[in-house]
Image (cartoon, grey):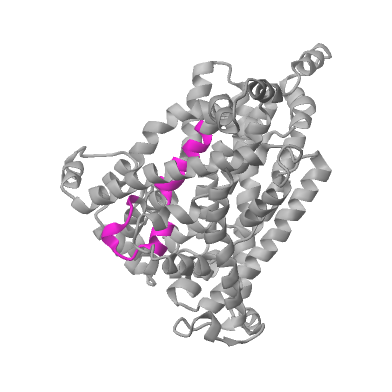
């Protein structure tokens, strides 16, 4: 009988979890995915947001590219056609299938673009007079100035990759290659096929709830650790990035 | 600098768009897109003949509207309450705690929710204290929707309050001083100063929520539902997933997805226009 107040405190589930090799394998796949995904996303995001933040006077094709990006954000071919492209590229069952289809997170690009637009133009003008190239201006002026917004999109990106269970469900066939959230999602998947109320009651009795709860705690721990450090940035990041001049 | 991003967008966004032709075909994987027979609008006609389609549309809109309505109200009230806290440390701590659930995934939270609302879970234990018989929340077509709305609001209200909190700090303190000199008490100030000051933000956020009436929350429902509650909680997105990827009716799945995203775009564009008219704000 589960009640509101806990009884019989024990850490035995955590001991059992230590020797669960599939859990840790999935954990490491998730870590790998976050690291690779973060590198790819951040590079593409900054490189896309910077030119888009320029006025069409400075960057003549800005409007054209902006429309392409907005169109890609609003409209998509949908799940099944995207799946077929990934399959054609022979990416199924590889970690890149989880990273490349979402390599350019457009909502974050727009957030970053608005932050870049808020940087005073005189900074760039002064640097140009001193002979700095656009690459230099981006890396030594713009990126440091919008650091709060960069911290915000970094948090969003990490959380997005860590929490995503669905793309692995679609693109990964081998269950041993599942990232952690997909692995956790599969723990409760039996419930989703129950058609008899009585079975639902029985299921909640037999399932290994204590062990599953331990898995859940460990799976959210990494987020709980980074989140408090990022919090002060994302509040200002969201507000600054959403304001347009 | 833009080149790499554009290349990725072409491969993973624009090329799949050509896959939309499947919606107008009887697509058979072995024959490929060029070999499959064209059927015109048959998939769309069939879609409206499926007996469940009306119920699925109703489920989607009802769940989404409740989530938007209650979520907005709770966020505003919470922002107002939080704004009254003067001790910095307490305020910061509260913010950390309530923003947190937004960053947890439904894959994880679903397991927690299922345990809490299970037959022998804490909620039923609590009801038992008042002599109420245990309810099988997860299988009840009566309780499943309210549970979806409740848990979704719990997850998102803190994060949703950020924007209101930010616009509360932008209200001119002089207005409060002036009104207190005129003898307004705390509640009068709330009614005549704070709420009018918040109005543009409320209007803006509600307008921008308009496209979400078709978005009832795939991740949450997908992880929580079961065939027993399909009648009240099967939504367009979960239906497309089951038809398209589980039952492999690629053409029908693509057709439903296409119709949904076209209506979605119309809603997004109208929300953008409306927001621009009402509050001078443009999303893009």
Q: Residue at x 49, y 73 (%)?
A: B244
Number of marks in the rendered image: 0
Quadrant that contains the C terminus of chain B: top right
**Does the magenta run of residues contain B136?**
no
Q: Residue at x 60, y 40 (%)?
A: A49
How far across and down, in percent of the image, does residue A109 sit?
59, 43
How far across and down, in percent of the image, does residue A91 sit?
39, 62
Front residue (pair B222, B58): B222
**Does the magenta run of residues contain A165?**
yes
Q: Is residue B273 visible?
A: yes
Q: Residue at x 28, y 51 (%)?
A: A26
Q: Residue at x 55, y 37 (%)?
A: B159
Classify residue B272 as left or right of residue B7. right
Q: Report the magenta stretch's main SS.
A: helix
Image quarter of residue B265: bottom right
Quadrant that contains the N terminus of chain B: top right
How far across and down, in percent of the image, does residue B281 sit?
76, 40
How far across and down, in percent of the image, does residue B252 sit?
56, 78
Q: Is residue B187 above or below residue B124?
A: above
Classify residue B31 as left or right of residue A28. right
Can you name the residue that lies furthest to the top here? Answer: B181
Image quarter of residue A46: top right
Q: Is residue B127 visible?
A: no
Image quarter of residue B196: top right
Front residue (pair A91, B47): A91
Classify residue B248 as left or right of residue B211. left
Magenta range is A151-180
Classify residue B119 as left or right of residue B209. left
Q: Is residue B84 above or below residue B72?
A: above
């Amino acid at each position: 009988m589960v009640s509101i107040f806990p009884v019989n405190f024990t850490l035995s589930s955590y001991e059992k979890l230590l020797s669960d090799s599939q859990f840790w394998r999935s954990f490491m796949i998730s870590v790998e995915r976050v690291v690779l995904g973060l590198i790819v996303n951040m590079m593409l995001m900054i490189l896309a947001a910077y030119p888009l933040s320029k006025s069409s006077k400075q960057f003549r094709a800005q409007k054209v590219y902006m429309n392409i990006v907005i169109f890609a954000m609003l409209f998509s071919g949908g799940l099944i056609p995207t799946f077929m492209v990934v399959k054609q590229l022979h990416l199924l069952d590889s970690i890149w299938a989880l990273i490349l289809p979402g390599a350019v997170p457009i909502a974050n690009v727009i957030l970053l673009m608005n932050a870049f637009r808020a940087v005073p133009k005189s900074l760039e003008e002064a640097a140009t007079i001193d002979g700095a190239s656009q690459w230099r201006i981006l890396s030594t002026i713009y990126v440091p100035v919008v650091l709060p917004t960069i911290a915000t999109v970094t948090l969003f990106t990490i959380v997005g990759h860590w929490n995503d269970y669905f793309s692995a469900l679609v693109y990964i066939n081998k269950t041993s290659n599942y990232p952690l959230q997909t692995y956790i999602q599969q723990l409760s998947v039996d419930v989703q096929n129950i058609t008899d109320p009585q079975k639902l009651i029985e299921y909640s009795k037999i399932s290994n709830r204590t062990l599953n709860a331990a898995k859940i705690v460990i799976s959210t721990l990494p987020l709980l650790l980074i989140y408090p450090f990022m919090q002060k940035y994302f509040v200002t990041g969201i507000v600054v990035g959403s304001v347009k001049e | 600098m833009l080149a790499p991003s554009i290349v990725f967008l072409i491969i993973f966004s624009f090329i799949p768009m050509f896959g939309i032709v499947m919606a107008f075909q009887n697509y058979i994987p072995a024959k490929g897109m060029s070999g499959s027979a064209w059927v015109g609008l048959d998939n769309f006609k069939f879609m409206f003949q499926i007996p469940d389609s009306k119920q699925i549309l109703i489920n989607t809109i009802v769940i989404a509207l409740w989530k938007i309505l209650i979520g907005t109200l709770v966020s505003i009230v919470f922002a107002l309450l939080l704004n009254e806290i003067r001790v910095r440390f307490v305020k910061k701590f509260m913010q950390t705690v309530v923003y947190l659930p937004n960053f947890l995934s439904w894959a994880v939270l679903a397991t927690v929710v299922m345990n809490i609302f299970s037959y022998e879970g804490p909620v039923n234990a609590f009801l038992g204290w008042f002599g109420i018989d245990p309810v099988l929340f997860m299988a009840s077509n009566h309780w499943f929707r309210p549970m979806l709305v409740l848990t979704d609001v719990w997850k998102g209200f803190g994060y949703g309050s950020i924007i209101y909190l930010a616009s509360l700090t932008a209200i001119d303190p002089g207005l409060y001083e002036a009104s207190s000199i005129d003898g307004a008490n705390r509640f009068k100030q709330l009614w005549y100063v704070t709420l009018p000051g918040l109005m543009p933000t409320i209007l803006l956020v509600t307008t921008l929520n308009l496209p979400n009436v078709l978005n009832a929350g795939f991740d949450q429902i997908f992880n929580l539902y079961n065939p027993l509650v399909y009648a009240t909680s099967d939504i367009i997105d979960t239906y497309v997933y089951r038809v398209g990827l589980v039952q492999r009716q690629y053409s029908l799945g693509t057709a439903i997805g296409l119709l949904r995203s076209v209506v979605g775009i119309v809603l997004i564009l109208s929300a953008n226009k409306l927001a621009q008219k009402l509050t001078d704000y443009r999303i893009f």
